[in-house]
Amino acid sequence: MRAIRRLTVRPVLPESLAALGELAGNLRWCWDIPTQDVFAHVDPKLWHSTHDPVRLLGRVPASRFDELAADAEFCAKLERAHADLRAYLAADLWYQRELTDAPRTIAYFSPEFGIAATLPQYSGGLGILAGDHLKAASDLGLPLVGVGLLYRHGYFDQTLSREGWQLESYPLVDPDEKPLTVLREADGSPAVVRLAMPGGPDLRARIWVAHVGRVPLLLLDTDIDPNPEHYVDITDRLYGGGAEHRLRQELLLGVGGVRALRAYSRITGAPVPDVYHTNEGHAGFQGLERIRELTLPAEQGGSGLSFDDALEMARASTVFTTHTPVPAGIDRFERSLIQQYFAAEGGVLPGVPTDRVLALGAEDYQGGDPGMHNMAVMGFRLAQRANGVSQLHGHVSRDMFNGLWPDFGESEVPIGSITNGVHLGTWVAREFQELMSEVGADIDGDPEAFARALDGVPFSRVWSVKRDLRERLVLDARARLRASWLARGAAAAELGWIDDALSPDVLTIGFARRVPSYKRLTLMLRDKDRLKRLLTDPDRPIQLVIAGKSHPADDGGKRLIQELVRFADDPEVRGHIVFLPNYEIGMAQTLYPGCDVWLNNPLRPYEACGTSGMKAALNGGLNLSILDGWWDEWFDGQNGWAIPSADGLADPNKRDDLEAAALYDLIEREVAPRFYDVDHNGVPMRWLEMMRHTLESLGPKVLATRMVRDYVTALYAPAAAAARRLNGDAHYAGAVELAEWKRRVREAWDGVRVEHVETHGVDIAPTVGSSLEVVAHVALGGLSPEDIEVQLAYGRTGDDDQLSAVQVVPLALRESFEGSRASFGGSVRLDRAGAFGYTVRVVPRHELLNTTTELGIAALA
Ligand SMILES: *Cc1c(COP(=O)(O)O)cnc(C)c1O
């Protein structure tokens, strides 16, 4: 019999164990080892099979609770964990201690959040990063609120067919079985967010709240009455369906997300956010909703601003992070679809002019497509501050979006970078954390101490911990392999070989990722014979543990998985290379610590940052990677190995051949010999030196707390300050002034010209140390000298007179003539011999701008 409806009855805990419910209701358990131990004590077997406190408590019989209530040791453990959670939630942390005048609250929007295996609301790096961002924000005490969607089916579970083809299934996520509570109005009814939809009834969503330590996460869910079926389906799954489905999800995330924040503040009294961070372009509509709020007439609760004034206000308070250097990965919609949703009778944002919406996402630059609405472009236009996720990616992004600031060179495009990081408590194996705490390292509070911790431990000890972790991975891999083969139709009797698959004493290389083509899952198969020899080398064998999901619509990715699986199925190598289906957080937490080497071979520069190698490094793994993303920045020659990249090469086949050969060479000549070079106790001292150096050089840098601090100081705090300046008097005088000034400058700009430049000091044969003096005469086009900055830009020149390594110094106002022209002067010392060139340019200047490149316009001599 099939049930017509299911509901989950939550357990009633004895009063003395009520704290268990509180511990289960806050996701901090997933990075707090003592709390995990409490749940393990409740029912070790259930705990190890679920790693899910809510399910655990739902299944334990009442009699067990009675036993536990009488178990003094358990009660003491529970009491400690509970007191610790309470203290954690109330403590003054970094944010409270170190920051004054910081943002009141930061809203963090993301289409996915990877927090715990039990909440499969992520597909890969973007979601894991968002999860780590929330956790680190919590550890630092940031007043941050996450905003996302609750996908009824999350992302898919991966299995394999007999032939090694990826199969997808979408298990139901029942919110009642998750650590989620519905946000309710004072009268107990669920709070509902409403969105107008063209040609239909309003879309409604309820709001689930998850507690990620101190950080609330609001998740919108359309599976409620009286939504029609096609609305219910909006939050059915992550990245499924066509463009319109995606657009509806993004409207819900952006517009609905802001409304959810308002409901949350109204109901709980939490402060209204003053900074809005959008993790990728998908949540870009949040800016439009905030503009709508500000332009609403006062009678309707708005501020009655003009669109332009409201735009300045929204921009000042928005931070946008771009995540992909792959052009095909940029989120875009047909303009006609946007029109359909915004312009129609009953459109999503009444009062917001559609032409302005379209203009914000228009690809109206060289190489753009006039038919597309680009969410990344809209992200940049709606945010005064923007960043990429590693230095190299910042560079690539500036280049990629240079068209939005056409009068400036790549280096001046206002996109910075903050390199991603990973959350220590989530990703460092418990044994490693314990080892470090044992030697007194304050692993939570002091990353430097964490990084130096191995100094205090004998190498033999570290090595034995590492072997334990490798062994745990081997056992886990065997279990997964067996389950996978049974699912693929093998008989148990055929699977004896799995008992000996992989070895806890063999150099273990991990390789796990999503499977878009740039990640090159199958690069290692370029020369299959050579790989076989490496895997089965009698003296220095390697073993490879591989995992990764392909997007369900990407048959190319599935073919790569199949190719790899078929190779790994070969009896000659199957005990040495394994593909583990269904890469997810739970598997990852065993995989990273168990690996000696983390392999990453993306097509440079398409890996925006990459974080898996960071997780490996924190567990004493050494990176073997193409110099892309974070590794390009922090590889120091000693903390791992760089696979040389042939990224100048036009022929992709040749490039793959070269890079694969370099990879085999490195493994054969450097990695394996070092690993197997052991002393009389069987300890590879040189390997451990490298491990220690890895932790010391990378430990403090790769932590998510470093990343979140960088976001606070470089972006959140300045954004909050900028927003305050625009609304210092609560009447938006600054926003009105800035919008009016921008309009005036844009109108006048055609008349702004560098008319004439006089130079002195370099007339005849200048030498190093001479001073170049410049006076520029500028036509103001009706602006005043205070509206502009006149700059001397100089650098090296090549044959084409193009300046490179450009530096810029502002020139000072000398004289003003009849208000229509002015002269500006200054000098620069020539401190390097060789070809030198310079020019003079005029850029707009205003104290409320973040950079003088912000408007994207300049007048050149
Ligand atoms: C870390 C992680 C990722 C992302 O890895 P990248 O190297 O950033 O691509 C994806 N999935 C899982 C399960 C992870 O733990």
Image: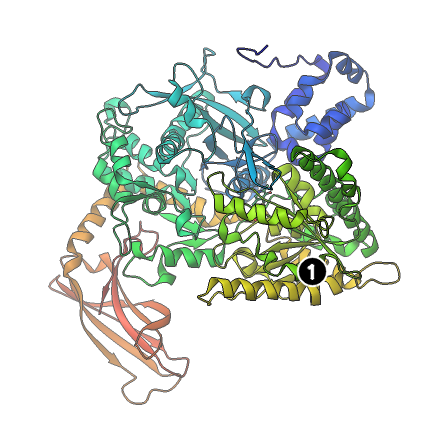
Q: Which quadrant contains ligand 1? A: top right
Q: Residue at x 66, y 41 (%)?
A: 589
Image quarter of the C terminus: bottom left
Image mark count: 1
Q: Is residue 580 left or right of residue 405?
A: right
Tell me, what colour scheme is on the image?
rainbow
- Residue type at numbered disc 1: His
- Looking at the image, is 235 positioned above or below residue 281? above
**Disc 1: residue Cβ within 8 A of ligand 1's nearest atom:** no
Q: Is residue 499 left or right of residue 394?
A: right
Q: Residue at x 37, y 71 (%)?
A: 804
Element on which disc 1 rests:
helix
- Looking at the image, is 434 positioned above or below residue 458? above
| Image x and y of residue 663, in percent | 62, 63
**Residue 111 is drawn in which quadrant?**
top left
**Residue 286 is drawn in which quadrant?**
top left
| Image x and y of residue 661, in percent | 60, 65
Image quarter of the N terminus: top right
**Residue 833 is drawn in which quadrant?**
bottom left
Between 613 and 39, the one lying in front of the other is 613
Q: Which residue sits furthest bottom? A: 765
Q: Residue at x 74, y 46 (%)?
A: 432
Q: Is residue 292 left or right of residue 694?
A: left
Q: Which residue sits furthest right? A: 680
- Residue 22 seen by the camera: yes
| Image x and y of residue 837, in percent | 32, 77
| Image x and y of residue 726, in percent | 31, 42
Between 843 and 30, the one lying in front of the other is 30
- Mark 1, Cα crowd under 10 Å, few <14 / some 14-19 / many 20+, is many
- Residue 19 seen by the camera: no
Q: Is residue 757 left or right of residue 234?
A: left
Name the residue that disc number 1 marks: 693
